[in-house]
Image (cartoon, rainbow, N blue to C red):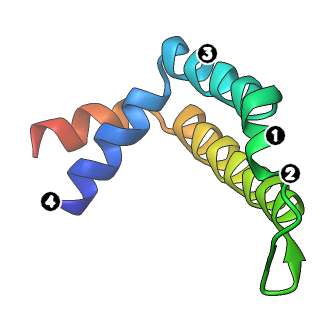
Amino acid sequence: MWPKLKITILKQLRLTESWVIFFVLGLIMLNYPFIHMFNKPKMLMGIPLLYLYLVLGWLVSIFVIYLFTKAADLPDEQEDKEEKD
């Protein structure tokens, strides 16, 4: 089950629409409403909330880019072979 799910997710990430959706989501997350929501004088584990939000967002964006590169490197033959199994 897991290999089929992995191939399905990577296949969906090859679509141009998913690239655009993640790009727009990244732009929205760095605009006024979200930055203002996390720009509070509160600390979480000794780290200001805004810094934590920006660092976690940065790490998530790196992970998404990693998934996109894995999807782009996926050969077409492997997709067809996994679908037949």
Q: Residues within 10 Å of mark 1 (few under 14, many from 20)?
A: few
Viewer-nearest of discs 3 and 1:
1
Q: Return the mark for residue 44.
A: none
Q: Is residue 83 above or below residue 16?
A: below
Amino acid on which disc 4 is placed: Met
Amino acid on which disc 2 is placed: Asn
Q: CA distance from mark 3 to mark 4?
A: 28 Å
Q: Return the mark for residue 20.
A: 3
The residue that mark 2 highlights is 39
Q: Is residue 31 visible?
A: no
Earlier along the polypeptide chain: callout 4 or callout 2? 4
Residue 32 occupies which quadrant of the picture?
Answer: top right
The residue that mark 4 highlights is 1
Viewer-nearest of discs 3 and 4:
3
Question: Picture coordinates of residue 3 (x, y %)?
Answer: 26, 57
Of all residues, the one furthest to the front in this rendering is: 41
Viewer-nearest of discs 1 and 4:
1
The residue that mark 1 highlights is 36
Of all residues, the one furthest to the left in this rendering is: 85
Amino acid on which disc 1 is placed: His
Of all residues, the one furthest to the bottom in this rendering is: 45
Do callouts 3 and 4 mark residues in contact (Cβ within 8 Å)? no
Earlier along the polypeptide chain: callout 3 or callout 2? 3
Q: CA distance from mark 1 to mark 2?
A: 5 Å
Q: Residues within 10 Å of mark 3 (few under 14, many from 20)?
A: few
Earlier along the polypeptide chain: callout 3 or callout 4? 4
